[in-house]
Amino acid sequence: MPELAEVEFFCQRWHRAAAGQRIVRVLTHDRKKILRHLELPVFRRALSGATLLSSATAAKQMLLRFTGGAWLGIHLGMSGELSVAPPTHTPRKHDHLVLVTDRHALVFNDPRMFGRVDFHLGREPPHWWTEIAPAISSKAFTVAAVAAFLQRRRRAPIKAVLLKQERFPGVGNWMADEILWRAGIHPARPAGSLQPREVGALWRACRRVCRDALDKIAGRGRTPPPDLNANIPRTWLFHHRWRRGGRCPKTGRPLAHDTIGGRTTCWSPARQKLPSS
């Protein structure tokens, strides 16, 4: 599933191709559930002739602002992807939305249809954007806020709690594993069992993983890499977590896998120990 940095990567792909350009045609698969909740005639009218002004990402969502007070929201779901094609592009079976400019076609493809397209007309950003939880990089993401959140979910495994978007926006399965591995915390630990020093380590790992992912995967502040995984260092758990016979890049010992909190999980038993108590 696309997470924080992957969403930034795809958003930049569209923005770099079409910022300042006018949408000359809007193509949709009207019967697909990704678009079914939209008033499609209004949607197409508002975007046809509009110019892309800016784009932003938050958590696992992106927002594109157009002239005329049009706001386009995209949630990629588990299998969604944004690509750029020639303006003559003919929509394929899973190309649910195509925005055509004089130079490019901006394509939203989602074969499993778990994604979502949102739309809003107005001067101010829509509520479904402004109500997203504060970013992990923000001042609102404090150690105290994390500690309180863990205590409210004290019996749940910490791996499951890290996937709660109301406190850890943008964190998905691989990022949660990476955070816990860096913090040295076993994913099955009850959230309320973490000691203050461990909560501090978790907070630091959350901020560091989010910052590093945006830097390495999305190339924030510069030209993005040619593909999502091109710049991820081999020292990250990411490169070893599903490799057969994979070993912890810190200890050199074998990695373990199991389903924790309903999600397939990888950790390093030599580094992330489960207290006997």
Image: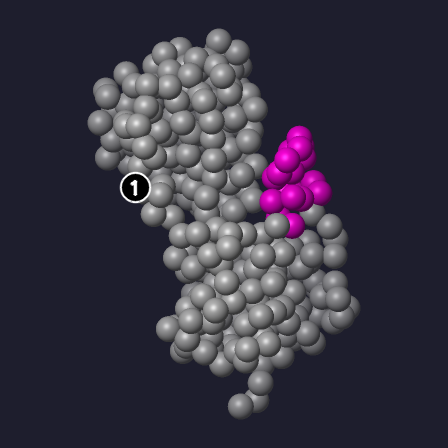
Q: Residue at x 64, y 72 (%)?
A: 184
Image spot of residue 22 (x, y percent): 43, 13
Q: Residue at x 51, y 19 (%)?
A: 18
Q: How many marks?
A: 1
Majority secondary structure of magenta residues: loop
Q: How is the image coloured?
A: one colour
Q: Residue at x 37, y 73 (%)?
A: 152
Image spot of residue 218 (x, y percent): 61, 39
Q: Picture quarter containing residue 206?
A: bottom right
- The secondary structure type at the circle numbered 1 is helix
Is residue 219 a member of the stretch shown in magenta?
yes
The answer, for residue 188, to whether it is visible in the render is yes
Per the image, the residue denoted by label 1 is 127
For the residue pair 246 and 201, the one nearer the viewer reads as 201
The answer, for residue 156, to whether it is visible in the render is no
Whether residue 195 is situated above or below residue 88 in the rendered picture: below
Is residue 83 a member of the stretch shown in magenta?
no
Residue range (magenta): 212-231
Classify residue 271 as left or right of residue 62: right
Image spot of residue 81 (x, y percent): 49, 35
Classify residue 97 as left or right of residue 5: left
Classify residue 158 as left or right of residue 36: right
